[in-house]
Image (tube, rainbow, N blue to C red):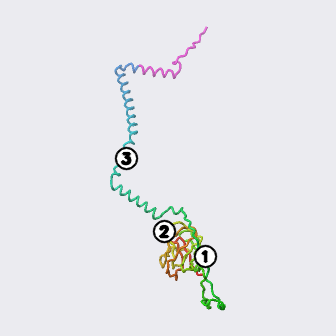
Amino acid sequence: MATVDSSFTVSSWPAGQAVASLAAAIGRFTSKVSPQARQRYSYRGTSVLRRVGAERKRSVTVHSNARRPLNAKTVTMLGRLLRKPLTWVVVAVLAVGGAFGLYWFQPWKLFTSVTVNETLPEAEAPTTAPATAPATAQATTPATGAPVKPAGNTLLRTGKLITHEHETSGDVQLIRLAGGEVQLVLRNLKTSDGPDVRVWLTDRPVAPDEWDTFDDGRWVELGRLKGNVGNQVYAVPAGTDLAGLRSVSLWCKRFSVSFGAAELRAV
């Protein structure tokens, strides 16, 4: 009766035979190496591994500590700079320059508005006497058609503000009061808030594109602009010769520009 061998060995396969041959070769090689050599090679391998690990650890330590000397150096440099008098001179100059710039330009006024509303005088336009005055007319009334001053305030000239450097609108009136004083009235004024804006009477003509010529001729300053919005009254200095003064300018004296101006016309 035939029998079947059901046992399995690695050597029965080609790949297994190759592995077995390699293992036998390694065994023959190691058998020829003395125990001292095997120990020495093992020690060298361990030493190499230890040396590589130490190098890696030192590299990580160096990189982790590399930032500390830089920060310390920066702090030391700043400390030396702060101890030098020249540094504080520069800081003081910058601070003074910044404060002067804020004072001179006053940039916050781009976002502010000041409204001033005063009681405005009422005035009448001068009347003209008829050519044939009635018999009951006063003796002082001329019969030649010359203007007659009413008993109250007299409206001398009027005008409308136009835009120059800043958007500006409103009406202007030049009024002679019953007592003889002359006032400039700004009605429904609306312009921008700005540094050192003055109210001027000038002899310059008014044109939309000529906003820097009002200081070239004769001008009379009536005071600082009280507010950039509202109704305001400005007194004309006593003894001012109004002849030739033909315009009103809201003049920024600091930067020599007109915010707005109005041509004065007789009524």
Region of the chain picked out in magenta, as a range: 1-27
Q: For the residue marked with disc 2, what is the amino acid?
A: Asp
* Residue underneath mark 3: 75
- Viewer-nearest residue: 261 or 8: 261
Label 2 environment density (alpha carbons within 10 Å; few <14, some 14–19, many ≥20): some
Looking at the image, tell me whether mark 2 or mark 3 is earlier in sequence order: 3
Q: Position of residue 115 (x, y in %)?
A: 56, 66
Label 3's element?
helix
- Viewer-nearest residue: 69 or 112: 112
Q: Position of residue 127 (x, y in %)?
A: 62, 84
Residue in the image at 53% along x and 17% along y: 9
Q: For the residue marked with disc 1, what is the amino acid?
A: Glu
Label 1's element?
loop
Give left or right: position of 96 versus 257.
Answer: left
Q: For the residue marked with disc 3, what is the amino acid?
A: Val
CA gap, disc 1 to disc 2? 29 Å
Label 2's element?
loop
Query: Does 105 sit above or below residue 56?
Result: below
SS assignment for the magenta stretch, majority: helix
Would you say the residues marked 1 and 2 are in contact, meaning their CB atoms lie under 8 Å apart? no
Label 1 environment density (alpha carbons within 10 Å; few <14, some 14–19, many ≥20): few
* Residue underneath mark 2: 196
